Amino acid sequence: NPYHSHIHAADVCSALWYLLSRTEIWVSAGMHNTLQMACMIAALGHDVGHFARNNVFLVASRDALAITYNDRSVLENFHASSLTRLLDESYGEAPDDRRTLLSSLSSSSVQRARNLMIALILG
């Protein structure tokens, strides 16, 4: 899909960073760095895996994703779920050196970040 590309993701991320930084919303809300990071990751991943169809089409055609998500915010749920799976993938060369992007965070911080990312993507 030419619109829902990595360029669109970077554009949304950049616009969000600009808006939240210039208006000082992060400062006034006392938002911790972990939650700021979660906002940026959600902006980058809000359309991950998009395949040029819309929710109306998926529901009307009884697509497997529409059935999985009970016809409710089908693509948004798909994007949030896909982003979570990507963030859970480990990387690193040596078996002892493998980690995930969020592995340096506590499990409660990961859960708070994940909840925020899902809320932002689902709207």
Image (spheres, rainbow, N blue to C red):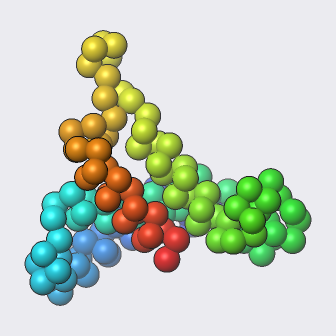
Specify the farthest residue to the front: 108
Does residue 21 appear in the picture of this structure? no
Compared with 82, 77 (above or below) is below
Answer left or right for 111 relative to 48: left
What's the residue at 29%, 44% (across, down)? 107
Q: Tell me where residue 98 appears, x and y as whole percent.
A: 32, 23
The image quadrant of residue 96 is top left
Residue 26 sits above or below residue 6 on the image: below
| Relative image position of residue 31 (x, y in whole percent) | 17, 71
Task: Pick the quarter of the image with the N terminus.
Answer: bottom right
Q: For the point 37% across and 65% down, which residue is it?
A: 116
| The residue positioned farthest toward the right in the image shown | 61
| Left or right: where 96 falls relative to 73 | left
* Residue drawn at (45%, 57%) of the image: 45
Q: Is residue 87 left or right of residue 64?
A: left
Task: In this rendered view, identify the residue nearer to me: 79 or 104.
Answer: 104
* Residue 51 image offset from top left, x and y in percent: 67, 57
Q: Quadrant of residue 32?
A: bottom left
Q: Give the residue displayed 24% in from the left and 63% down from the top.
A: 35
Residue 55, position in %: x, y?
Answer: 72, 71
The mark tally for this picture is: 0
Residue 110 appears anywhere in the view: yes
Q: Nearer the viewer, residue 9 or 66?
A: 66
- In the displayed structure, 112 sits above or below 100; it is below
Q: In the rendered image, which quarter is residue 65 located in?
A: bottom right
